[in-house]
Amino acid sequence: MNRSPDSLTGSYGLGPLGVAAAIFFMMGFVTWLNGPLISFVRVAFSLGDVSAFLVPLVFYLSYFLFSIPASFVARSLGLRRGLSGALVLCAAGVTLFGQFVSMRIYGGALAGLLVLGSGLALMQVVINPLVSLLGPSERAAQRIAIMGVCNKFAGILAPIVLATVVMGDIGNVAEKAQLAATPEARDAILNSFVHAIYAPYMSMAVVLLVAAVGVIFFPLPELQAPPLPSVSGSSEKIFRPHLVFGIAAMFIYVGIEVMAGDAIGTYGQGFGLPLSETKFFTSLTLAGMLAGYVAGFVVVPRIITQERFLEFSCIGGCILTIAAFLTYGYASVLCVALLGATNAMIMPTIFPIAIRGAGPWTPLASALIVMAYSGGAIIPQIYVLLKPYVGFQAMFALLVLPSYLAVLFYARRYGQTGLLPLDQKQ
């Protein structure tokens, strides 16, 4: 095993990276269920688009609410116990969601997503700095790309599993519920439909709990954050421009990612495509992201730098967004799905740029960036609120195209290397 300080993982070896990869797989599985869940709850609870899109809103809003508290929990518990606690929270959220959905209590199901999101917020705050700092900084995006491959491979599987096991007959269920002669008959149809989700979600909860126990006993490095500096005013130094604008760039980017991944089913339905097909569209986007991560792993930093790859990703996203607007039906949906490939290396590159030089403030910087994942709550809601007035294709382009341009500006302005750590900054 290569444990050279110049290797992909520095002196820690591949073990911690393997654990992180397994955790990213689990994170991807529970996160990327949101896309098909939007279609699922729309039918199960007889909802419109705005109410159905409360699924990503509540899920990603939890990052905004819990990331700062999670940073203090992470500092207090350390890596091993922090990861284990995050997995327990995720298991609790999955359990609540499955229980309340099977009872057709939408508010309770959303509360379960909030708990799940709080666990993922803690997990992100702990795991992202680990992966970013576990080796040379110029290979940080490459390490995160490996995590992305695991995350997005799980994301490909999750919608397929949910669509096959739970939503196999969703088109007929929706039609039968709509044509039901009485409210009681409709409820009987929908109650039978939602009950299928209970066993899969309870199974996921068990897997998460087993993983929580496993993390406790695996020999992970105890990466505690260094003591916070005591110099007066030093906390202000964390808010340097590359972090402040990195938070904004991450907010915008996660909104783009959710639009391409979770909203693609609703986008396809705008063309009149059937639910039996649109329930799989999230997997198409995730397949694109998987391809993008593999490409990033191969070419960064061997051929181009991670910062230049970020610029090319934004340019490619702009081209595909325009193509999606100018085409129709399956061709337009394919352009949206291909945004997954251009999106893949954006987050892995923004994160190490934004926390560069944060030193002992890295946990707080990480938490602030994770808070920005709440862009996945806000931007899709803007989309569903305004698309009836603007048109679903035009609204998609109006949100996504300027977002890519903003991230491109950040990459060009702050992608340079060589920022000094806080304790060396004069």
Image (spheres, rainbow, N blue to C red):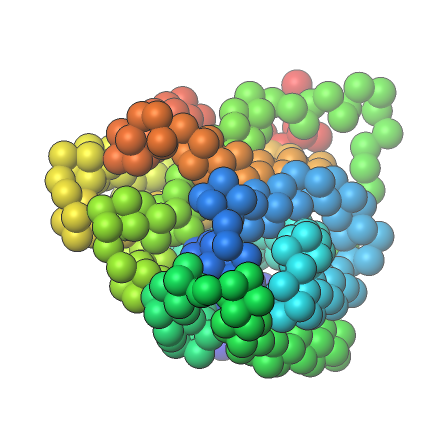
**Residue at the spot x=57%, y=67% of the render?**
184
Give the x, y percent position of residue 96: 70, 65
Q: Residue furthest front?
A: 181
**Residue at the spot x=39%, y=43% of the render?**
259
**Would residue 421 be seen by someone viewing this image from the given angle?**
yes
Q: Depth check: give the residue in front, 315 or 276.
A: 276
Q: In this rendering, is residue 55 above or below 307?
A: below
**Residue at the spot x=66%, y=68% of the render?**
103
Q: Quadrant of residue 239?
A: top right
**Residue at the spot x=36%, y=31% of the render?**
388
Give the x, y percent position of residue 276: 30, 66
The quarter of the image holding the C terminus is: top right
Q: Depth check: give the residue in front, 204 or 112.
A: 112
Q: In this rendering, is residue 244 above or below 303?
A: above
**Would residue 159 be seen by someone viewing this image from the given angle?**
no
The answer to whether residue 98 is left or right of residue 41 is right
